[in-house]
Amino acid sequence: MNFEGLDPGLGEYAPGLHGGLEPGLDSSMDPRLDPALLQGVELDPDALAVPVSESMHIVEGMYSELHSMAAEVGIPVTATHFDLQEELLWMGNHRGHASSFFGPTMGRYSSFQVHMTDDIRHIQSMDTGVLFLTKNNLKCLTRGGLIMFDYPMEEGANMHSLILTDNNTLLMGGLQNYVAELDLTTVQETQKFTVEVPGVAIMKQSNRFFFCGHTSGKVSLRDLRTFKMEHEFDAFSGSLSDFDVHGNLLAACGFSSRGLNGLSCDRFLMVYDLRMMRAITPMQVHVDPLFLRFIPTYTSRLAIISQTGQCQFCEPTGLASLADIFHVNTVGQLLMSFDVSSSKQALSFGDSGGCVHLWSSAPEVSFNSYSRETELALPCLVDSLPQLDWNHELMPLSLLPMPLTSTEPLLSDWPTSLITPSPRRAPLVDPEILRTMKTVGFIGYAPNPRTRPRNQVPYKIKDIELEYDSYNQVPESPIGRDEEPHLYMVPKKYRKVTIKYSKLGLEDFDFKHYNRTLFAGLEPHIPNAYCNCMIQVLYFLEPVRYLVQNHLCQKEFCLACELGFLFHMLDLSRGDPCQASNFLRAFRTIPEASALGLILADSDEQTGKARLGRLIQSWNRFILAQLHQETLEQEGPQAYRGASSSTLGSSGESVIGRLFGCEVENSSLCRCGKETVRSSLTLLFTMHYPEQRSPEEYDFAEILKKSICLEQSTQAWCDNCEKYQPTVQTRNIRCLPDVLVINCEVNSTKEAEFWKAQTELTESEEAEGASVFDLVVTVSHIQDARTGGNLVAHIKVGETYHQRKEGVTHQQWYLFNDFLIEPIDKAESAQFDVNWKVPAVLYYVKRNYNAKYDLRIKNPIDASVLLTEASLARKQRKSHATFIPLMVSEMPQAADLVGLDAEFVTLNQEEAELRSDGTKSTIKPSQMSVARITCVRGQGTNEGVPFIDDYISTQEQVVDYLTQYSGIKPGDLDAKISSKHLTTLKSTYLKLRFLIDTGVRFVGHGLQKDFRVINLMVPKEQVIDTVYLFHMPRKRMISLRFLAWYFLDLNIQSETHDSIEDARTALQLYRKYVELSHNGGQEEFRKVLKALYEKGRKLDWKVPDIDSADGQGSPKSTNH
């Protein structure tokens, strides 16, 4: 670009960005401008390059000059930049010197030399320091001027702009044939992207492209990953001065070629539509444009600034007006640089005379919305010593002034014998270990005598008694990383709870230690179990509990159905924890849940990377919408013949909509006067906190009201104007729902400060004619750096739940933390220490709201689920059938016997660690999925004949079919190639639920694990487990194969397992148990068991070969 003839005085400086253009004309600056620029601008004709007096009046919303500061007189200011982290304004000049000014008073903060000769062309602030770009050097310095790194570039480089692509990577471009990518972590160039000569002078970025401005007058659009050119706009025939991008618009200003007369400033701005990739009508302006910026507020208005100090505002698709021009008084100097603060309240201009002009729309201006505290130089403390508290236990004694008045030694002058390093010697090896040790090679092995704690060496320190466990953590702040970390403690009951597995699995884990109530907790070691607390919330809302238990549809994966099954388990449990495995399995298959980012990877859950507070609020919104949709859908032909349809399906009205739904009127008022009103249904509200004033100045009810009846300004389409216009959108409600759900959205320091002050969320006073709402749920995000954090719920459990579980009528608040359940005080539910306990979701209910709803469970599962059904497998034939379905006359009755066996496959292998003594410790058990379920008749003429033999289709990846133990082979569960009777898990689950509800007694071996993996809760009186029938206290459990050989002389499971054979064998063993018990009584049966254990020990619990002639036959064959 050639600027000859514009200002001959600039010719004495070295060529800069655009040929003869001064380097200060680099236009890569922050595009975020103040919305106040949209207002009329008041001209201050008396503004000079001197500080403004404190008595000067600044009209709110009008820009006026607040301060002018001369950094170095006569040296052009080539770059200005508002710090994005602190209240600092940076400037760099033509001689490579940088200065910073603090706050609106522009007090000098720091000043240092960046480069000895070259001008500073670009300044960019980061969290840790500030980047300064010169012609062939990039330097990063702290805000105080200490060098963090100095990156020289290759000879011939002529850099002009840089852009941060993420926290650790930047791109640098200039007048050469490449753009360099630099890794800020290693300060290494990672790659070079080749570009056309004469290079890239200006760079911008959107979510679709990199935009590169070239001195030839062109703007190219490049791919974000490969930097390849996708499109190109030929904006100006001469040269490009500046451009900016906002939404779907790109605007550029520059110079046109005038033949022999060189270049002249073009007063037409080129505007391009990025959707159609073509130019729209050029826009004429009244100033000679040098800098150009979009103002990204509720319009796409442009700010155009000339070199002489004129500034004009106009719409990119409208006409410019002379009334929208104001002038920066530079006392004859030319503007060389320009920037806007991120808060849009301040503008800065740098001129060729070395002055920086600060313009503001308010006297108390803030450069950023949330600036961190700037570290200022400490004042001299010689004459003003601070008050020291001698009694404070953490007060360092070195702060006490100690004048030396004599030659006596100081207390800190310890003798040499006391300050000589003396490392603590390793303790001697226990003699018992040496005595019992066996040496293999050079390694000794010995049993642990257990005289000392594992992996610990006794070390005498002062005993500290703490109310909680003795550890402190520095939390990851819920608000961000810019505030000072605080030491704090998370109370033990709020911490993440884990299950410790032994070789018996869960059997010897004491859940009662964590839950002494009769309510059921939920186990956490399942993928995506972060939502356990919200499942409990829905369960303790009485209408929701009845709704989902009455719901039954034909969809394979229906969250309402699965919640109904899970709530039925929670009803049956007497304090034992349940698993939400089937619900979460269905949840993982919902496409919307995956699209919303609600499906977590195992690594994110274990490492604590997930932002659980935001996640549970999104889950809350999703589950209400999903339940509303699923229960509103009209049912088609019933999947389960004769099953009564959901009450919602028949009525066409969703109870979720009646319970949570609120009709809102959304009113949009365009500035042309046209108002559009639309009605919609919303199921929850999100808290919106005031931006202008501190949230602490409001009470909770006031902010909640403003959040429900929301008013905000935004850009929206107006049919009357036929274009996007600034629109005021207002939301009004007709009446509040029965259950008011609130997402708290605590994402900043100001919002956290508001919650610190809230202590009366549960208080309510009844006014005449008003509905009273009571707080019944608070869900909090517990932030614990040690465990990665977790979610807990405080729930006010109603009278009906206590009546069913405990037979008493009262209400009580409880803390639900997975399987930990503990009564708490009402006040604790509404107290939030945001250092570690951040509110996420609140539920309010209208007093006595239950009276409106039908609270009766009509079990929709009937006998038709047991009748014949088609197989999912294409190759399955009736001749291959392995079972005979029940006839209507054979339908089971209460107390009938049913033999049951299930086979499983592994979805995820277990995670375990090897301890120092060689034993294995299970960290996370393997995740199993049921693959085959068999039920055989337990009485009648067809006793032992199976009536259910279902192979369960699965869509999840199977890592191990366990064929040796399950008999399941690859392909058996694939509908395309399987020859088995293949069904869905839901279909078979309903059959078992019907049998449980009927009251049959299941007979099997190891049924506890079977029911756990199937995800069923069966009352103990309906389970007959042969593993416990033939078991002596404190002795090992005996396998089904050994029992069958010993008592029935059957050789089963010789090669692989077959669930039909196992179920029949369990039935026969039960008949044998009944026979032995009735014939000889308990004493005789005890002798039989004793003989069983003696025989087992002799044979090492292995069944001998059938053909062996060693006399090791079973007792039954011996009697024969």
Image (spheres, rainbow, N blue to C red):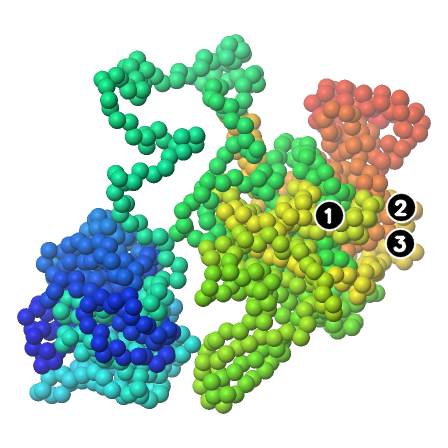
Is residue 343 visible in this depiction of the protein? yes
Residue to which mark 1 is pinned: 812
The structure residue drawn at horizontal position 45% and vertical position 12%, both measured from the top left corner, is: 428
Say if 101 sits above or below 455 in the image: below
Residue to which mark 2 is pinned: 896
Mark 2, mark 1: which one is toward the viewer? 1
Residue to which mark 3 is pinned: 891
The structure residue drawn at horizontal position 7% and vertical position 77%, both measured from the top left corner, is: 8
Which corner quadrant of the image does residue 315 belong to? bottom left
Name the one closer to the observer, 821 or 823. 823
Q: Position of residue 115 (x, y in %)?
A: 14, 56
Q: CA distance from mark 3 to mark 1?
A: 43 Å
Q: Are the residues tagged 3 and 1 within 8 Å (C-beta)?
A: no
Q: Secondary structure at mark 1?
A: strand
Which corner quadrant of the image does residue 861 belong to? bottom right
In this rendering, position of residue 227 left or right of residue 666 = left
In this rendering, position of residue 1020 left or right of residue 161 = right
Q: Position of residue 91 (x, y in %)?
A: 21, 62
Mark 1 residue type: Gln
